[in-house]
Image (cartoon, rainbow, N blue to C red):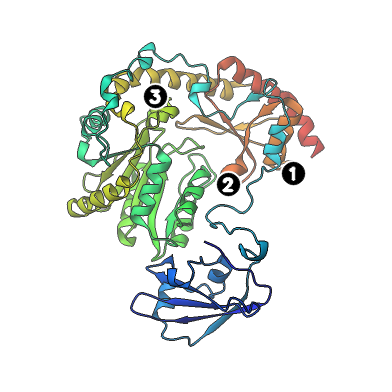
Amino acid sequence: MVMFSCSADAEIAFGPIGKGFLVLWWALLADDNLKYAGFVIKDNGFIPAGAFGGCSLPEIVRKCIDNRSLDDAVRRRGPSRCWTCRCASQGMLDGGRMAFSNRIPEELGPNEYFKSLESVPSSDLIDLTVSNPSRCGFRYPEALSKVLARPENLDYEPDPRGTETARKALAEYLSTADDPVDAGDLFLTASTSEAYSLLFRLLADPGQDVHIPLPGYPLLEHLARLDGIRVLPYRLRREPGWPLDRESLERRISEQSRVLVTISPHNPTGTWFDGKTMEGLIERCARSGMALVSDEVFRDYAEGVLPGFPKDPGILTFRLGGLSKTLGLPGWKLSWIRMGGPTDLLREARERLEFAADAYLSVNTPVQAALRDILALAPGMTEMIRNRVRGNRKLLEGYGWKGVGLKVWPAQGGWYGLLELPDQGVDDESVASGLILKASLAVHPGSFYEMEGDFLVVSLLGEPEEFQEGLKRLDQALPAILKAG
């Protein structure tokens, strides 16, 4: 699909061709060889009109409609009003370049932080950003290397929900005396990212809204954008426990709100909402017709008991988990969605989600076939990772800073530690870049997670000797970096 070049102004007019449809005529006044390009708009989405050359709609055109919703545009009768815009110089006419979807960011090059990272030899670098357990020196059980060697791996019987055998094994693993899990409420996916994407497509149309917490992991915004969903974040207050900023959420909720995301334990703060807050969010979702997605991938690393969900929440709920965190096996590519909600609504959601998942069938057979044996090893793996994280957190909290005093924020779980920088007029991204260049030390700036104030975020997964050496380098280098500004 192409967008056609035009250096002069172009007129845009609307004219209906039937209920729910609209033809957009784009008159390219500066090009005698191409007078019109056509588009069909239906159900809040853009469908190329093959009869008009299969063109796609430029973002510049979307923005020039005075921010009106497409529903409003569809209700218009006749080309009673025109808008004027300047067309982007894009296309494949006369040597122009191909136009790409605006779901992908325009700028994809490295920022200053990553340019600094690329300039330091990896052999000299201590990486306190590592989030891949398989690179952190853990001794995985030998039995893991054998569980995938089974003849049934050659037999392919796809199920969009995941095989029944695998889902039953997972249901048994997740069930507790107070919270039994039904295998029929589980969907297997290749990753938590895929789970998010399937749920966004299930629950929201392009242009509708999902609410995610800030600070937060930046991947969620990219996932929503790739699915054409608008992200309207809500804030966590910058105080111990990072509680919900209710006013920021209320300001964001509208008739276009479809999904509310919570993360428990949160990444990177390591905190979670208490039971009363979760009850309030469920009630708010019910009043606004939203579904609740609870990302619980770090659940096994919570220092305490996370609040449960009511047996009949009155809304659709989706709880996410995966082997990436539970067993420290990100490369084995298996995650899950646990569904909940009113019986009739849940049945319809299950059918629709099955339809969407059937288009991809992305979960591999060997891991599903071996899942019961894999999960039997989970308690030992989880405990090994948990002990490493606890030990490094203890090192972090007890470290005697000699250079500049850093405030270590308390956490209730997760894999990360937060260090608040003193207010000396130097932003955290500059500090993080300086640590790479001057100390061969990689930490994440809090700005990567949209944190208010200046923070450094460190992973607690690394081997203790390397982690302690990283803290030492941080302590020694930080005064000069802050002084240099």
Tell me the residue at 22%/35% (across/down).
181
Circle 1 residue: 425
Residue 289 position by quadrant: bottom left
Q: Earlier in the sequence, mark 1 or mark 3?
A: 3
Foreground residue among 242 and 474: 474
Circle 3 residue: 327
Q: Quadrant of the C terminus?
A: top right
Q: Is residue 438 left or right of residue 376?
A: right
Q: Is residue 26 left or right of residue 330?
A: right
Residue 385 at x, y = what percent? 45, 21
Q: CA distance from mark 1 to mark 3?
A: 41 Å
Label 3: few (<14), some (14–19) or many (≥20) C-alpha neighbours in 10 Å: many
Tell me the residue at 30%/57% (across/down).
286
Q: CA distance from mark 1 to mark 2?
A: 18 Å
Q: Is residue 468 left or right of residue 323?
A: right
Circle 1 or circle 3, nearest the eye: 3
Foreground residue among 93 and 119: 93
Q: Is residue 303 left or right of residue 287?
A: right
Circle 1 or circle 2, nearest the eye: 2
Could you tell me if residue 256 is visible in this image?
A: yes
Tell me the amino acid under the disc marked 3. Leu
Q: Element under label 1?
A: loop
Disc 2 + disc 3, Cβ < 8 Å: no
Tell me if residue 436 comes above or below residue 345 in the rendering.
Answer: above
Label 2: few (<14), some (14–19) or many (≥20) C-alpha neighbours in 10 Å: some
Q: Residue furthest top?
A: 142
Tell me if residue 402 comes above or below residue 26 in the rendering.
Answer: above
Residue 91 position by quadrant: bottom right
Q: CA distance from mark 2 to mark 3?
A: 29 Å
Residue 433 at x, y = what percent? 71, 36
Circle 2 residue: 450
Tell me the amino acid under the disc marked 1. Gly
